[in-house]
Amino acid sequence: MHRRQFVLTLAGASAASLGSMHRASSATAQTPSDVPTPPPARSLSRGQDGSLVGSARPPGTLAPAITSNDAFYIVTKNAAGDPNLDAATWRMVIDGEVNSAVQLDYQVLRALPPVEITKTLECISNFTSQCEQASFGCELISTAAWRGARLSDVLSLAGGLTSNAAGLAVLSADEFSAGLPVDVITDPEALLVYEMNGQVLPREHGYPARLLVPGRYGMKNPKWVVGIRATTQEYAGWYEQRNWNKDGIVHTMARVDVPANNTGLTPGVQPIAGIAYAGARGIQMVEYSADGGQTWQTAVLEAPLDRDTWVRWQGTFYLEPGSQAVLVARATDGSSATQTDAFSLPQPDGATGWNSVSVQATA
């Protein structure tokens, strides 16, 4: 069925259409000259498969609770460059199995009731063990504070989904796409975001708008969104078409940040610290070992910043004079499931395995 398509803008919207925006903010409409613009995108080294850049964390340092925009990991499939969109002319189409297909502009998006969350993103290509196998290692994971509009509010502009809707196709300006089940709409933290860490969303992270959905790898959180299409069956996105996992639910993981791998330490009591992440399931416990997993101690956890964020953990271990220690970490998620020690590469379901580092006692 072909449905009539409307364009929603603050400048030309009628009182009725503004009412359909769930009492959107009454802030003064932005003119094109008022539209916030991010700085130029970070320069990336690209190959034929695009670019994968880990978070900028100095070795042997605990990841900060919030990752700065400049240090946040970047994954892009675009070998020749990413989209360079203008928010003043940007439009997002909502069509398919909706009651009234629409286009919305940037001003309308920012006029919807704003929601702020803190959320961790992890790429499905991230390693959780044997970090040395990839140039980005175990660093394709970062945490930021985000601001945007609820996906449910965005889709309500199109009158909601029809009873025939069984999936969502989220379409990006770079021909990337992601398939999601329709039940993500009911999650209040599924957002179309336009700010990151209190700043306008950087170009390399999806300006003008990217989708965030709790509990799923970055492949399900597309950047540069220009369309959401409700479909009558499940939609296979860019990654799924290349035989990656169709659901993209993150695995439970823990990482040792402190100390750095292959470093010399003075004998005696030494600190150990790192991060753990299990998506929206949360982290119940982190354990660490100083003897390669033969015995375990329970780490002290910091309080999570939000529902779907990593948790920082810490503890101490004793390093015997003249010895070498293999430090290992494992996490138990909020469902009481402990992460597996079995190593697997990221493709197709996401990496698994316990993270470990080796240290030596100096004379």
Image: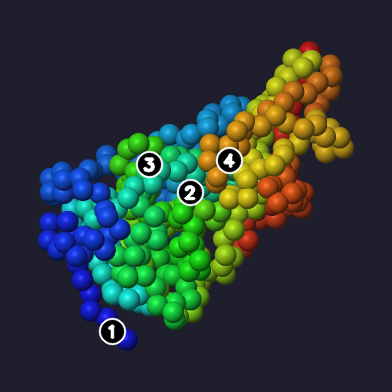
Residue assigned mark 1:
2
Could you tell me which secondary element the residue under label 4 belongs to? loop
Could you tell me which secondary element the residue under label 1 belongs to? loop
Residue assigned mark 4:
310
Q: First in sequence, mark 2 or 1: give its number.
A: 1
Q: First in sequence, mark 3 or 1: give its number.
A: 1
Mark in front: 3 vs 1? 1
Query: Left or right: 40 with respect to 322?
Result: left
Q: First in sequence, mark 3 or 4: give its number.
A: 3
In the image, residue 111 above or below residue 155: above
Q: Residues within 10 Å of mark 4 (few under 14, many from 20)?
A: many
Q: Amino acid at mark 1?
A: His
Mark in front: 4 vs 2? 4
Figure label count: 4
Q: Residue at x 70, y 55 (%)?
A: 344
Q: Amino acid at mark 4?
A: Trp
Q: Badges 3 and 1: C-beta atoms under 8 Å apart?
A: no
Specify the quadrant of the image occupied by residue 358.
top right
Residue 2 placement (x, y as % from top left): 28, 84
Q: Amino acid at mark 2?
A: Leu
Q: Badges 3 and 4: C-beta atoms under 8 Å apart?
A: no
Q: Quadrant of the N terminus?
A: bottom left
Residue assigned mark 3:
196
Hey, which residue is sitting farthest right in the picture? 294
Q: Residues within 10 Å of mark 2 (few under 14, many from 20)?
A: many
Q: Amino acid at mark 3?
A: Met
